[in-house]
Image (cartoon, rainbow, N blue to C red):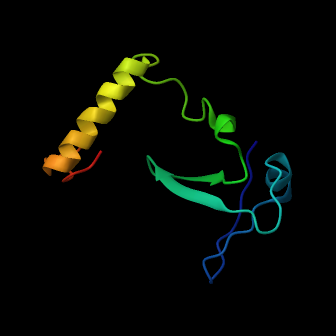
Amino acid sequence: MGAYASLTSKGQLTIPKDVRDALSLKTGDMIAWTVVDGYLVGTPRNLDFADLAGFLGDPPGGPASLEEIDAAVRDAVGRHVAGDKSRDGQEGGA
């Protein structure tokens, strides 16, 4: 599904009705906005975490085991605590 929306002079967007209906959005629902590879991605906050499974597609190199995830988290926390630069060059980033 795709749709277009125009940005107003006040910086507002109206989400098209078919998109709102498909996502069960209603007045007052929150949307988290993120920029990913130059694309604006809006994620409704009215979804359960499980609804987002597979949202980013398959991970490169296949799924990670719990041990690999734990090791990556330990590494990132260790770099942050030590104030080391992360792999992307940002200080203390994870």
Q: Quadrant of the N terminus?
A: top right
Which residue is located at x 77 percent, y 68 percent? 28
Residue found at the very far bottom of the displayed protein: 10
Residue 20 appearing in the image: yes
Query: Does residue 55 lie above or below 36 as drawn?
Result: above
Which residue is located at x 73 percent, y 46 percent? 2
Task: Residue 68: give x, y in percent of width and height.
Answer: 35, 21
Is residue 60 rendered to the left or right of residue 52? left
Location of residue 6 by image quarter: bottom right
Q: Quadrant of the C terminus?
A: top left
Which residue is located at x 19 percent, y 49 percent? 81
Residue sitting nearer the eye, 30 or 65: 65
Is residue 36 rendered to the left or right of residue 30? left
Query: Does residue 21 lie above or below 56 as drawn?
Result: below
Is residue 81 rendered to the left or right of residue 47? left
Is residue 19 rendered to the left or right of residue 40? right
Query: Does residue 11 lie above or below 53 as drawn?
Result: below
Location of residue 8 by image quarter: bottom right
Location of residue 45 by image quarter: bottom right
Task: Residue 32: give x, y in percent of width and height.
Answer: 59, 58
Task: Residue 36: give x, y in percent of width and height.
Answer: 47, 48
Which residue is located at x 72 percent, y 58 percent? 4
